[in-house]
Amino acid sequence: KVGLDGREHEQVDEAVIKQLQNIFADVSSKEQQRRHEANKNTTWFGVHHDEDQPYLEHTNRLVDILQDGRRGVHDERFPHLVSFVGQTGAGKSTIIKMLMNYTQDGVYNPRGYPAPVPGLVGDNISTTGNVHLYADMQTYDSKQPILYADCEGLAGGGNRPRGLVRWEGLESVKHPRTYVKQNLRALTRLKLKWADIPSRSRREFAVTNLFPRILYTFSDVVVFVLREARTFESHVLKLLIDWAAKSIDKSVNQPSRPHIIIVLNQTDPAINEEEWNPNHATERLLNDFADSVKHIGALKEVVAKLEGAGLMINTTKDLLEFYYSSITVVRIPSKGRYMQMYTQVKLLHEAIGSKCSESYHQKQTIRMALNSERLPQYVNKAYHHFSRHLDKPFDFVEEAHRHMPLPKSFGEHMLNLMLSIYKHSRDNITTTFTKLCRPVAACIMLAAMRDNIQGPYSSILHKAYKSTLQDAFFQFCNSWLRCSFQRNSQQCCNTKYAHEKGHQAESGKLLSKGAYQSPFDANSSFSEWIRNIDHQIRNLNAPVEISHRDERDFVPVMHRSVMNDFYNETVAKLELKSHLTCLYCLQKIPSNPLPCGHMLCKACVRSCGETRGQGIYQLRECPLHPTETRWPSPVYIRFKPQDAGVRVLCLDGGGIRGIVELAILRKMDDVLGNHVPIQNFFDLIVGTSTGGIIALGLGVKGWTVEQCTTHFKNLCRQAFTPRGPSLLKPFTIVGFKSYYRTKPLEAVLRSAFDDNTSLYGDHKVGSPASIRVAVTATAASDGRPTILSNYNTEAERSHMPYGFLRPHDPNKELKVWQAARATSAAPPHFKDFTHSDASYIDGAMHYNCPVEVADQERRLL
C-alpha cells in the first residue's frame, strides 16, 4: 500500500512514533511558559543589557553538566562541544531534542534531563535566548561525552527571544526568592568594554559577533540548520562563511578547526531515496553550488582576500574547507514520515560522533586535548578575553602555559627555564640553547654529587638525564616554538603542533597558507646540544681528574662560579625570577624566598648556607649574585627537623562568628603566658573564609591576637554594607549578584593587609620563623576547591582532591589582601573575586572546616 505521497507505508515502531509526536505536539502558551521555566538552568552564556550597557553573563552550566556525568569509571574525560547555529526558526532546538531522545536501546532520556524548548507553530520569533547547553544521553557517562550548545538564531537580536523573556522576566520578578536559591552559583557578569558605540551595543551585534568567537574557538563540530535548501546559495552560504570568517582569525594556535554538518531540515519526503544518504547529499549540495564563489559578490570578496594570502579557491567546497575541517550534509524529513525521521536523526548522531572522534584524535596526537577540568578553565579565560578584546585573538599556547603542571623532573624544570628565556630573550633559539649548555652541565654534576650517583659524569648524562632532556627539548620545539615564517615584517605565531590554519600573525591575520617552518632542525640540533653539554661536563670535570681533588669540595665551588656567570649573562639581563624552578640548581621547586626576590630550594639553602643548629640556616648573600647581595643582616631559614611532627592550627569559616575563634586563641595565649606570639607555636595554619582572614593575619602579617581582633571587628563594621533594604534583598541579589557591596569589603582588606605584600615570595630579613599559611577558595570556572598559600612544597600534588595555585609568572602572585578576598567571597553575600582572569568564591563551598586540607598539607611539609 502507498500513502498520499505515493510512497509505501512505513513499518513503524510505536515507541518511536510516540516520542516524536510528543516533540512535535503543539502546546498551550501556559505549557510553553512552564517549559521555559524548567529550562532556565540550562543557560550557558549570553548577553544582558543593564541601563544600555551590555554585559557578557555566563553560568557554571558547563562545569555542572560535566560533574553530573561523572561515574568514577574514567580517570579522565574529554568532552566534545557541538554547536547548533542557523537561521531563526530553522528547528535547531527541535533537532537537539530529537538527538537527546534518540538511544539505541529504546529508552528515551531516562534521567529526565532538561531538553530544548521547540517553538510554537506559526511563531516567527526566536525560541532560544542566548546559548544553552545540553548533554547527549548516549555518551553522557563515557570517556568522551558530547555536549550540545543551542545558540540563539542568527537573525536574533532585533526581537527578544521567547526563552530570554521568560528567563529574565518570570524568574527575576515573579519568583525572586526561588531564583536566588537556585542560582547562587549562576551568573558571572563581565562588561563588554568594546561596546563603546551604539552599533556595538545592540544585542544583535553580540549575537552575530561575540557568540561565534566563543563557539567556533572551542567547538569540535558546528551543526548549521536550515529549512530550505534553495536558499543555500542566496542567503545561507553567506551566513555560514560569515559566521566562521568572524572567528577563524580570532584565535591562534587553535589545535583544530571545527567540522561542519549542514542539516537540511524539513526536507520533502518524496525526494529520491539516494538523497537521504549523507555522502550523496554532501556531494550533491557541493556540486550544485560549486560555482557560487564566482558570482556572489560577498563571497567573491572573501575569495579575493584569501587568494591574496596564497590560497587557491576554485569552488564552494574549497572555501568551506578553509574554514572547517570537513563538510557533511544530512537531510531530516518533514513531519509525517516518522520512521524515516528517526533513521535520519540516527545518521546525524553517527556523523556527529564520528567527527567528534576525529577531532579528539587530532588534538590528542598533538597533546592539546582539553579534559573536563581544563575545558571550563579555557572557556572561562575566553569569556574574559573576548569581553575586553573583540578583535584580539585568543592564544591557546599562552593559556596552556598558565596551566602547565608543577615541574617534577629535571627535564620539566629545564622546559620551564627554556620558556622563561624564550619569552623574554631576543636571541635566536640556537644561541639560547648554546648558552644553556654550561649551566646544565654544572647542574647535572651537582645533582649527581648530591644524590651520590656513581659513575663518570658523562655516563650519568646519557643514562640518567638524556631522556628527560629530550622530552623537554622536543616538547619545546613542537608545542612552544613559534614558526619562523615572515611576511611584510610580520612573523607567524603558530607552533608546529597548532599550525593547521597556516601562517598567522599575532593579530590573527592569515599571512599565508603553508606548513610550519622551524628556525632550526630539531633532531640534529638536539644531538648537537647533548654533545655540547657532554663537552662542557668533561671540561668542568678536568681539574678534578688532573689534581685528584675531592669532588665534594670542588663541585659546589665550580657550580657556583658557573651559575654566577649564567646569572650575569642571562638571568640578570632578562630579569628572570621563578617561583617554580630553583634557578641555582635547576632541579627542585624553590620554597625559600630571599630579599633579592630569588627563590632557593631546600637543598640549595643547606649547601649555600651556614648551619646554626636546630634546623636553622644562615645566608649572607644570594648564591646567584653574591657580590651584589651582601645583606646588612643575614637571612635565617628554618627547616623542620626530620623526625619532628607538624603543629597545625585549623580555623573554620563562619562569618561574624570568627570572633569566637579569636576568643579561644586569646585564652590559649593567656594559658601559654603571653611570652611568645601564639602563631610561633604552629608550623602550619589553615583557614577558610573568616578563618582564612585570621590565618593570614596571624601567620603572614604577624599580628597578635589582639591586633587580629581589632582588624576583625573593623572588618565586620565596614564590610557588611548592604546595597538596599533587607525587604528587597532577593531583588538586590538578582540585580547586583550580591547583597553586600564589594568596594567596602575590599577597601577594609587593603587597609588591613596593605596593597603591596605578596602572599608568596616576600621575605622579612632577620625573621627566624617560617610559618606556613594556606587558605581555601573555590575556582569559579570549574567549581574545584583550591588552596592559596605562602609556601611551596617539593612533594607530588597530582593526587590531591584540591588544586594548588602557584603562577608561573611571579608578577601574577596574589597579594595577601587578595587571598583574603578570595577565601571570603561567599555567594550571595559578596561577588566573586577575579585575579588574572581567574575567579574565586568562598572556600566554604567545599571546606568550611578545612581539617582535611590541613591533614593533607602537613604530610607534605
Image: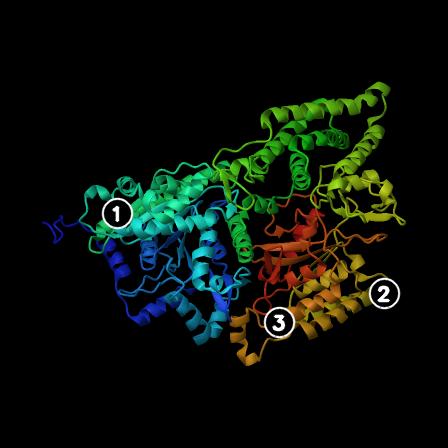
The residue wearing badge 2 is: 673
Give the residue drawn at x 75%, y 66%: 752
- 454 left or right, relative to 384: right
Q: Nearer the viewer, mark 2 or mark 3?
A: 3
- 684 left or right, relative to 47: right
Estimate the x, y position of residue 377 in percent, counting from the top left: 54, 52
3D distance between C-alphas at marks 2 and 3: 41 Å
User: Which label number is shown at residue 741?
Assistant: 3
The residue wearing badge 1 is: 343
3D distance between C-alphas at marks 3 and 1: 56 Å
Q: How many marks?
A: 3
The image quadrant of residue 134 is bottom left
N-terminal of the pair, mark 2 or mark 3, is: 2
The crowd level at tag 3 (other Cα within 10 Å; few <14, some 14-19, many 20+) is many
The image quadrant of residue 121 is bottom left
The image quadrant of residue 489 is top right
Give the residue drawn at x 42%, y 48%: 244
Estimate the x, y position of residue 849 in percent, counting from the top left: 64, 61
Amino acid under label 3? Arg
N-terminal of the pair, mark 3 or mark 1, is: 1
- SS label for mark 3: loop
* In-front residue for pair 97/208: 208
- SS label for mark 2: loop
